[in-house]
Amino acid sequence: MPAGRSPTEPPRRRLVGPKFWSGVVGVPLLLVLLYHGGWVLFVPSVAAMLIGMEEFYRGVERQGVRPTRLVGYVCGAGIFAATQFVARDPAWRSGAITTCVAGAVLLSMMAQFRRPAGSSVIANTGATVFGVVWIALLFSFFLRLRAIPLTGLPGVPADGLRDRMGVIFLVIAGVWLQDNAAQLIGRAFGTRKPWPLVSPNKTWEGCAGGLLACLVATIGIGGGIGLPVLHMIALGFTMGILGQFGDFCKSLIKRELGIKDFGSILPGHGGILDRFDSLLFAMPVACLYFRLFILAP
C-alpha cells in the first residue's frame, strides 16, 4: 500500500488507462496503413483476421468443440487474397471466394474422419465454417471498402487522401464513435436494458446515443468529402443500427462460451473480435450501399 494512504481508502482511478494508450498508438498506425494500402495494408489485415479466428476457435474449444484450425486459416487467407488481388474481375473474385467457403465445408467435413473421440461432427464442422464466414468473409469487406474509389463522383474533389481512404475511414469513424458514445451515454444516463441476458451493460439510452453519434459522424465526414447528405443520413442510420446488432451478437456468442473477452491483444479493448465486432456487421452493408446507390451509373 502506498505511504500515506488509509487502508480503507479506495484506490485512485487513473486518468488514462490502457484503452487510451491503445488509441494513441493504434489510430495513427491504422491511418498510415489505410493511406498506403496495397501490401502494407494487406499483410496486417490478414494477420488481424487470423488472430480473430484463433480467438474464436480457442473460445469454442472451451465447450468441447474441435474446429479444424488449418482449414479455417487457409480458407480465410484465400478469401482475403481473392478480395485484394482479383478485385478487377468481380466474377472471378466471387468464384474464388465461393470456392474458399465451399472448401471450408468440404475439408472440415473430411477432417472429421479423424476427429477426437466423443466430439461432434456437426459442431466441429459448423464452428470451422462459421469462423470462416463470420470473421474472414465479413472482415474482407475492410479491403473492399478501402478499394472503393471516389474519383469522378459529382461534387467530390479529386484528392489523394479522399480517394485512398475516404470510404473506409468514413465507415470506421462512424462505427467506432457509435461504440464509444453508446458506452459513455449508457453509463451516464442508461436505465432501461433491451436484452440484459445478452448484454447486461447495454441500455436503450446508450443505443440511442450511439446511433446519433454514428449519424453525426457519417454526415460530417461524408459531407466533408463531398458525398450527398441524404445518402449519408441513410448510411449513418443503417450502420448505427447494424453496428450495435454486431455488438449484441458477439455478446451472445461470448455468453454461450462463458468468456468475458475473446482475447487480450488490444489493452483496454480485449481481442480483435472485441474491437471489430460492430464493423463486421456494418462494413458489408456499407459496401453494398455505396455500390448500389452512390457509385451506380
Image (spheres, grey):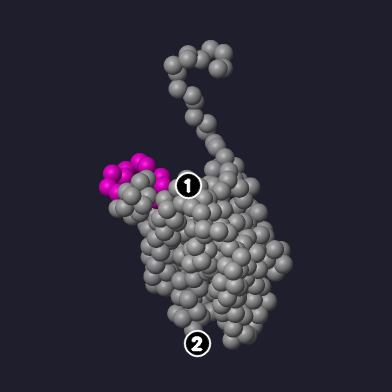
Identify the image quadrant of residue 150.
bottom right
Depth check, front residue: 87 or 76: 76
Magenta stretch contains residue 181:
yes
Residue 107 % position (x, y): 60, 73
Q: Secondary structure at mark 2?
A: loop
Tell me if 10 is positioned left or right of 200 in this view. right
Residue 48 % position (x, y): 62, 58
Residue 219 % position (x, y): 44, 64
Q: Which residue in the structure is indicated by mark 2?
A: 297
Magenta residues, start to end: 179-193
Does label 2 or label 1 sit earlier along the sequence?
1
Q: Secondary structure at mark 1?
A: loop
| Of the two numbered discs 2 and 1 in the rendering, the one whose residue sits closer to the viewer | 1
**Label 2 with label 1: CB-CB less than 8 Å:** no
Q: Quadrant of the N terminus?
A: top right
Residue at 39% across, 60% down? 245
| Number of the label disc, if any, that sits on residue 259 | 1
What type is the residue that disc 1 sits on? Ile
Report the magenta stretch's main SS: helix
Residue 81 % position (x, y): 66, 73
